[in-house]
Image: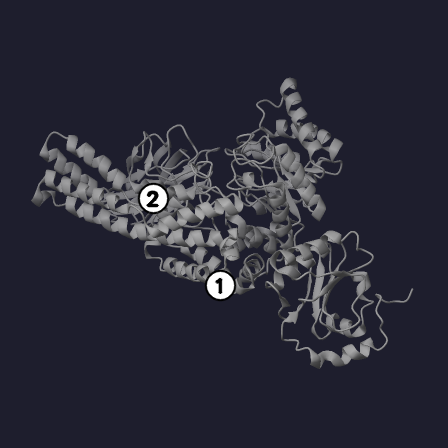
Amino acid sequence: MPNTLHLPILGLLLWWSTALSAQDSTSPLDLSKASVYVSPVQRADWQKVTAVLRDEVSRRSTVQLPVRNALESNDAPQIVLITEAEKAKLPDDWLREIRTLSPIGPEGYQLFTIPWARKVVLVANDKRGALYAMGKLLRKLEIHPDRLLLSGHLKLSSTPRYEIRGHQLGYRPKTNAYDAWSADQFDQYIRELAIFGANSIEIMPPRTDDDFTSRHMPIPAIEMIAAQSAACADYDLDVWMWYPNMGTDYEHPDSIAKEIAERHEVFAAVPRLDHLFVPGGDPGDLAPDILFAWLEQVATVLHQYHPEAKIWVSPQVFRPTRLWLGSFYQHINRKYDWLGGVVFGPWVKTPLPEIRHLIDPDIPIRRYPDITHSLSSQYPIPHWDLAYAITLGRECINPRPEDQKRIHNALDEWGNGSLSYSEGTNDDVNKFIWSDQDWDPETPVIETLRDYARFFIGPDYTESVAQGLLSLERNLRGPLLTNEQVEKSLWQWQAMEARAPQAVRSNFRFQMGVIRAYFDAYIQQRLIRETYVENLARQQLGDYGSNGVKEAINRCEETLAEYRKQQGVHPFKEKCEQMADDLYESIGAQLTVEKHGAMGGRGNFIDNIDNPLNDIAYIYSELNKIKALRTTEAQRAAIAALLHRENPGEGGCYDNFGDPASWERVLVRTPLTEDPGNLKTPRVSFGVGLIGEEWVHEITATGFSGQATPLAWANQITTLYDQPLEVLYEDLDPESSYRIRVAYTGRFKSRMKLTADGLPVHDFIQTGTQPLHEFAIPAEAVQDGQVLFTWTCGEAERGAQVSEVWIIKAQKE
């Protein structure tokens, strides 16, 4: 057989060598009438790859891209997909263009254009490489209704840095959209993730820490996971399954038999399963000896259906002890035949670099980043404004592209890639950022966002949507009251919306950007107004000396009541509610509980749109107590105490640790760039704390016995586990004595102790039963004019939390 790819070479090379002047290499390559040529060696195996290209182009345009069995012998445009071995058979003029490209590794590809020949060449060694090459091409194509253009002279060779790149798509009621999807919708989303480099998808068994079904589910979970697995197999993606231990006893034979029977059913249902991830806890807390003995039994069942599958396990436990962790890592280092590796995810106490040093070097580590939650999570938004925490909540639409790159790149070198924790479409942008970073951590965020906008929204929105997504992240930074970015972001999205055709306006990814822009602007306007109203009401109450107690209370209450009447309907609020309906129709997004069937405290942030952003509830509550007092003197004293609650007195200090200004006193010994999960670095947390509960899904200024509380108690400075929380007070009077009043609020309700310069202030006390405590500060600690306060928790506690501190100077008589 001649050394050729079915090319009539004679005379053609001469034409190609002189044709450069006929095609300007800087102008877009027009592929509107292009055909597709696929290597005859791989044509059958790569048929799905060709289908992906043709489907995605035809979905967006009238361009057809017919498949040809030979390379075009004239100047007809063509997309060529071949193996690296076949590349040597290309014409010499083509090869001269690409001689400097580096060789490709597993799953890698080369992609280059020959502008003067009107050809796009994709080179791969395996099906995944071919899929990712085609995905990269799709990301760069400008797909118009009747045209297909490719700008720029592409010339790249790319192999993924990390071997695990994927995302969790759990079909269960707790999610904010996935449970409403059909099998076809999952197939399409899996395809889209693969186009951006994902090679793994994680599914879930029917029984998890959730309801068994929901009103949204079109088919039973056992059928859906089979469809998800089959879709992954079709694209040659690895299938993972997150399978928590939900049983009550993993030692009794009867309980074990029930659990084993369930796993037979689940493993038999899925056509492909490469990896099983069993969390050590959250849920399913087991002692390591019991856990690993149980996993041995699980492996036996798993291998009956999927002989090559491996089991991965995480040291994930809410209240870890040194004994538990030591035993866990001992088991890991025994390197059981069934063990795939270790998973580093939420509620893993050991920092990732330490895990890498604790376990055998050849045991892989998979990161399990929480990209879906904005608070009470592994990677919360740093110093988030309380108004956002109250309204956007834990599981809002949360594009955080720059944060995600920072989080990824802080720890990527210590693992083998990642497979994210996701609860729905709210984190859609974050998924694609992680996939691109796992492929190449040097990828600029803006490049991913432009690809995202070009491919998913359209080439006319490449720059505007990319910049719009960055603007939404900037909305979340710093104090909302003074964030001028919020209004500018709204203007950007309004301008895009005004010119968008119906196809764009009905695109769920575009809708998610629009609803956030309006929501943020509405919350900012409310915050400005409510801050003003509260200040006015406080001023009126403060006139009790001149107007009398009764009149001052009446005017205060009238001001607050009038504002509540005026809230009514706002066009931005109406827009958000309409967009919530649109998102429910377009993608099954559940942004409210009652109307859209969301699970409370999850993706239903539209339900929070009018939650109070000021101390109105607390003021009303205190006014009711004041009115019940019997004497005017007592009422006047109570009003003064309400209005001056934060006053530390002469020579004193007050800090609300939800306020960024107070963080100047907080010692941060490890930067976020090295510790994005705050395992050693303080963070802001939210939630007053409810008696009998340790989890706060929605942030409100109520807690303890259910009464209204100061808004300041709804956020705290927090360190995790037994990591010390250190706050330094300087410029104190060495000759004076001081007391410290501290507000202990938050969802952890840990046992904490406090020292001042290492001297005891109080021993371990149980927090969560009363908020305020007051103690003397040891005189020795004040002698140098500064005091380092250190809060620590006992072993197996969740962490230290402090919302307010008063340093009260003793007044000389």
Badge 2 density bin: few <14, some 14–19, many ≥20, Cα 10 Å: some
Viewer-nearest residue: 174 or 405: 174
Percent from the top left, x then y, of residue 718? Answer: 41, 42
- Which residue is painted at 55% across and 38% down in the image? 179
The residue singled out by tag 1 in the image is 464
Q: How is the image coloured?
A: one colour
Q: Which mark is residue 230?
A: none
The residue indicated by pointer 2 is 610
- State whether residue 660 appears in this view: no
Please state which amino acid type lies under the numbered disc 1.
Ser
Question: Left or right: 774 with respect to 216?
Answer: left
Tell me where residue 298 appears, x and y as whole percent: 68, 29
Residue visible at 71% across and 75% down in the picture: 116
Q: Residue 293's spot in the image, x, y percent?
A: 66, 27
Q: Is 428 located above or below residue 630 in the figure? A: below
Three-letter amino acid code of the residue under disc 2? Asp
- Tell me if 6 is positioned left or right of 485 in this view: right
Which of the marked residues, 2 or 1, is nearer the chain's N terminus? 1
Query: Percent position (x, y) of residue 142?
Result: 60, 64
Q: Nearer the viewer, residue 794 or 138?
A: 138
Residue 344 is at least partly visible in this image: yes
Q: Quadrant of the N terminus?
A: bottom right
At 53% from the left edge and 43% from the top edge, which residue is drawn?
Answer: 424
Q: Left or right: 421 with respect to 711?
A: right
Q: CA distance from mark 2 to mark 1?
A: 30 Å
Relative depth, front residue between 738 and 217? 217
